[in-house]
Image (tube, rainbow, N blue to C red):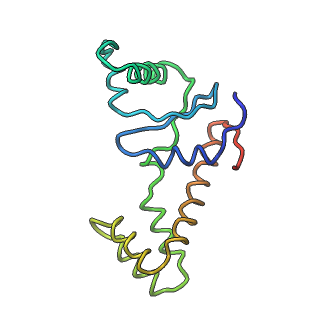
Amino acid sequence: MPDKVKLSDIIDYMQMQNEEVSSYLNKETGELITLSNEVFEAAEEDQPLENFQDWQQEEIKTAAEIMETDKYVQLPSSFEIHEYKIMERFCFSIADQEVSERLCSAIRGSGAFRRFKDNILRLDLEDEWYKFRDEEYKEIAIDWCRENGVEFVDQ
């Protein structure tokens, strides 16, 4: 195992992910990488590397290595992080009952993320929200590190 991985780096990579990309930690080097689903598809289908740019070839090789070895561990995905649940917990954490109810109402139905962001801006809760969200991500990252035997430094 490499030197300790910075918790802040793990969190940054967790926040980069979406439905199209996933992030991984190389357990031997401590390197964090993000690869697209497209790269994994190319590796799975064994497409000829010469059909791709040099940088894509490297990513495809890495994707193949991820699939074929246990050298890498996937960071918590956007599905495992549940940003909606983080927003919901934030809504319930607000001491002012009226504001709490307003935020809870904003996150119901389609367009919840946009309405939530609009409301935290309107209610001047942006700093509190980002502090809360950052703490939630930090806890998820710490739990992930412990579950996967990854030594980290809190920087």
**Which residue is at a point 51% across and 69% down the rendered structure image?**
129
**Which residue is at a point 44% across and 55% down the rendered structure image?**
82
Q: Position of residue 138 (x, y in %)?
A: 61, 54
Specify the farthest residue to the front: 54
Q: Is residue 29 above or below residue 7?
A: above
Specify the farthest residue to the left: 110
Number of numbered discs:
0
Q: Is residue 152 above or below residue 92?
A: above
Q: Position of residue 29 (x, y in %)?
A: 64, 26
Q: Position of residue 68 (x, y in %)?
A: 47, 18
Q: Is residue 84 left or right of residue 24?
A: left
**Which residue is at a point 35% across and 44% down the rendered structure image?**
19
Q: Is residue 93 above or below residue 73?
A: below
* Quarter of the image where one finds residue 150: top right
Q: Is residue 5 left or right of residue 68?
A: right
**Which residue is at a point 36% across and 70% down the rendered structure image?**
107
Q: Position of residue 137 (x, y in %)?
A: 56, 55
Specify the quadrant that holds the N terminus. Answer: top right
